[in-house]
C-alpha cells in the first residue's frame, strides 16, 4: 500500500491564463510617482535626450519633472508665461527646444535650458491643439488648430511658410511624416487621417503661387470611422497608429494608407492616447474608461492592462522604454517604472532559481579534526527524524472511519473549503456513498442544514461538489424518501426555495447579457 497523503486544501480554479514573458515584463511596471495638478492634465511628453525630463501640460503652465540623485522624482522648473490655457507640447529631437500651443491661437517656441520664449507663432483663428517639429530640418515646425488648419513655420525667421485647410473639424494629432521636412501626417475630429506632401501642388492650383498662398496636396487619406483623439507614427515613417472612439487601427502609409490591423473594441470608452515604446514593438493606449492597455504593435495582441484611478486623457512612454506616464481628467498624473529585476531581462522567479543553495549543515566524515572535501556527503546522526503530527480528519481518513469523516464534514465549525475538500477526497476514493449511507435522522438533518448553509455562498465552480453530496445523501437514506419528520421536510423545502431563487437569478442574468450584447453591437 502506498504512503498516506494528508488532506490537501481544495485548489481554487485559475482565473487567467499563464502569462507570457512579454506580459511578465509589463507586469513589472509599478507606480513610482503620482502628482495632482490644479487642473486637467492635457498632455505629457518626455524629452528625447537624457535625463528624459517630463513636461506636464496643465492649466496655464508647463511643469518639468525628472528623477533626482536620490531616485525620487522632483519638479525642476516650470514655464508659466502664458495668458491662456496650454493645449499641447512637443520636444525637438535634440531636446533643446519645445513647442507649447495655447488656447488663444498662438504657439510658443521655448528654449529648454533657459525656459525663455524665443518665438510666438500667431495667426490661428482658434486654439492650437497640436504641434510638432520636423525631423529632417530642425528649423521647420508645424501647428494644427481647432479650426482644422495646418500651418508650416520657419523657426529662424518666425515666418509662416504655408497654410493648409487640412480638416473640416478640430485637429488633434500632428506628426512628421515621410518625405523630409515637407511631409506631415494629421488627424482630427472629422475622422480622417491625412498624409501631406507640401512640395506637391494640388490639382488646379497656380504653380506660380508660393508661401502661404500655395495649396498643398493630400497624398493619402484614411477614414478611421470615429473622431480621432490621438495618433503616433512609427520610427520608419511608413506606419501610423490612430486612436479614436473605442477603436485602434494601424495604417501602412507606404501603401497609400492601406489598413493593416484594426481593433474596434479596444476599450469600452473613447481612447484618448496612443504611444509607442522605445523599440516600437509595443503600443500603449489609455482611455476614458480608466484603463491603460499594452498591445503588440504588429498584431495588436493584448499583453497587459493597468487599472487607473480615473479617466485618462494622455499618455507618454519614456524614450529608454523603462517607464511611462499617464495623465488623468481630474488633474492627477502617475508615472509607472519597470522594476530593476525586470530591466535586466530576467524574471524575479528566474533570478531566485539562479541563486546557489546555501549549505547550512556541517559534518565530519574522517574524525573530529578532519575537514570535509568538496565531494563529501554530509550525514547528521545527531538528530532523529521527528514524526509529523496529523490532524483529526487525516487520522479518520487514514483509518477509513468514514462516519466520523462525515460528522467532521457537516460540523458547523468546519470551514467551507475544508468540508468541500473532504467531499472531493471521498469522491476520489469512491467512498462518498459509504460515508453518507444509512445515517440516523439527526445526522441527516445536520447534513441537510450543512447543504443549506453552503449553497450559493461558495465558488460557482465548486457547487458540483455540493450537488454530489446532496444527491448521494438523498439516494442513500430512507428517512429522506420522502422526509419522515417535519424538521427534515422544512430543511428540504428551504433548499428548494434557494435553488429556485438561484435559477431566477440566472435567468435574469441571461436576459441582461443579451441586452448588453445588443447595445454593444449597435
Image (spheres, rainbow, N blue to C red):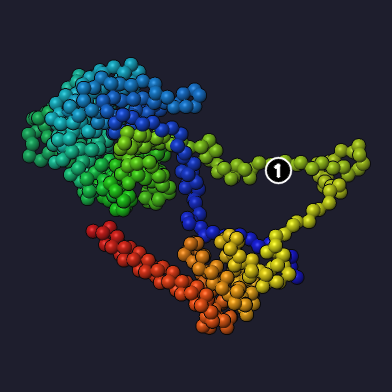
Q: Who is closer to the viewer here, 500 or 66?
A: 500
Residue 197 % position (x, y) = 20, 37
Quarter of the rendering occupied by the N terminus: bottom right
Residue 428 in percent (x, y) is at 62, 71
Image-based side of 363 in relation to 133, left or right:
right
Identify the element where label 1 is drawn: loop
Quarter of the figure with residue 117: top left
Residue where numbered disc 1 is placed: 357
Q: Is residue 446 visible?
A: yes
State the residue at coordinates (75%, 56%). Answer: 388
* Residue that appears at 46% across and 43% down: 26
The residue depicted at 20 percent of the width and 29 percent of the height is 103
Count of picture labels: 1
Taking depth in this image into account, of 364 and 241 the one nearest to the observer is 364
Q: Is residue 27 left or right of residue 109?
A: right
Instruction: Return the x and y of residue 488 as percentages of the image width and height.
Output: 52, 76
Amino acid at each position: 500500500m502506498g504512503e498516506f497523503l494528508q488532506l490537501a486544501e481544495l485548489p481554487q480554479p485559475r482565473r487567467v491564463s499563464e502569462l507570457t514573458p512579454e506580459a511578465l515584463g509589463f507586469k513589472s511596471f509599478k507606480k513610482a510617482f503620482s502628482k495632482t495638478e490644479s487642473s486637467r492634465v492635457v498632455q505629457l511628453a518626455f524629452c528625447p535626450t537624457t535625463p528624459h525630463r517630463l513636461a506636464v501640460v496643465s492649466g496655464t503652465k508647463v511643469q518639468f519633472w525628472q528623477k533626482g540623485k536620490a531616485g525620487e522624482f522632483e519638479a525642476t522648473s516650470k514655464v508659466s508665461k502664458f495668458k491662456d490655457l496650454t493645449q499641447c507640447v512637443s520636444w525637438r529631437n535634440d531636446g533643446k527646444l519645445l513647442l507649447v500651443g495655447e488656447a488663444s491661437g498662438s504657439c510658443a517656441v521655448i528654449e529648454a535650458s533657459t525656459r525663455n520664449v524665443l518665438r510666438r507663432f500667431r495667426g490661428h483663428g482658434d486654439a492650437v491643439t497640436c504641434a510638432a517639429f520636423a525631423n529632417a530640418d530642425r528649423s521647420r515646425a508645424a501647428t494644427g488648430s481647432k479650426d482644422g488648419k495646418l500651418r508650416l513655420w520657419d523657426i529662424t525667421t518666425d515666418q509662416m511658410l504655408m497654410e493648409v485647410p487640412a480638416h473640416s473639424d478640430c485637429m488633434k494629432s500632428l506628426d512628421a511624416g515621410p518625405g523630409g521636412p515637407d511631409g506631415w501626417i494629421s488627424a482630427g475630429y472629422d475622422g480622417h487621417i491625412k498624409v501631406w506632401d507640401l512640395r506637391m501642388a494640388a490639382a488646379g492650383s497656380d504653380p506660380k503661387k508660393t508661401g502661404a498662398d500655395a495649396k498643398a496636396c493630400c497624398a493619402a487619406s484614411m477614414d478611421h470611422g470615429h473622431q480621432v483623439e490621438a495618433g503616433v507614427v512609427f520610427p520608419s515613417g511608413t506606419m501610423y497608429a490612430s486612436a479614436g472612439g473605442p477603436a485602434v487601427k494601424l495604417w501602412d502609409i507606404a501603401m497609400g494608407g492601406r489598413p493593416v490591423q484594426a481593433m474596434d473594441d479596444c476599450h469600452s470608452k473613447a481612447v484618448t492616447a496612443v504611444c509607442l515604446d522605445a523599440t516600437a514593438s509595443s503600443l500603449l493606449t489609455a482611455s476614458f474608461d480608466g484603463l491603460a492597455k499594452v498591445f503588440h504593435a504588429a498584431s495588436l495582441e493584448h499583453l497587459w492592462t493597468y487599472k487607473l484611478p480615473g479617466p485618462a486623457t494622455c499618455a507618454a512612454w519614456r524614450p529608454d522604454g523603462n517607464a511611462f506616464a499617464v495623465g488623468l481628467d481630474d488633474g492627477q498624473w502617475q508615472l509607472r517604472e519597470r522594476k530593476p529585476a525586470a530591466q535586466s531581462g530576467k524574471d524575479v522567479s528566474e533570478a531566485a532559481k539562479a541563486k546557489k543553495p546555501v549549505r547550512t549543515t556541517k559534518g565530519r566524515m574522517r574524525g573530529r579534526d578532519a575537514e570535509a572535501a568538496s565531494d563529501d556527503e554530509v550525514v547528521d546522526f545527531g538528530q532523529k527524524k521527528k514524526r509529523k503530527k496529523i490532524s483529526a480528519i487525516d487520522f479518520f481518513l487514514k483509518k477509513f472511519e468514514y462516519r466520523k469523516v462525515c460528522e467532521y464534514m457537516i460540523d458547523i465549525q468546519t470551514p467551507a473549503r475544508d468540508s468541500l475538500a473532504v467531499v472531493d477526497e471521498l469522491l476520489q476514493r469512491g467512498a462518498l456513498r459509504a460515508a453518507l449511507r444509512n445515517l440516523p435522522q439527526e445526522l441527516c438533518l445536520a447534513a441537510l442544514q450543512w447543504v443549506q448553509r453552503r449553497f450559493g455562498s461558495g465558488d460557482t465552480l465548486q457547487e458540483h461538489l455540493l450537488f454530489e453530496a446532496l444527491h448521494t445523501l438523498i439516494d442513500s437514506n430512507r428517512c429522506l424518501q420522502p422526509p419522515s419528520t417535519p424538521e427534515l421536510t422544512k430543511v428540504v423545502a428551504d433548499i428548494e426555495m434557494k435553488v429556485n431563487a438561484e435559477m431566477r437569478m440566472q435567468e435574469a442574468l441571461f436576459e441582461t447579457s443579451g441586452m448588453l450584447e445588443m447595445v454593444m453591437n449597435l
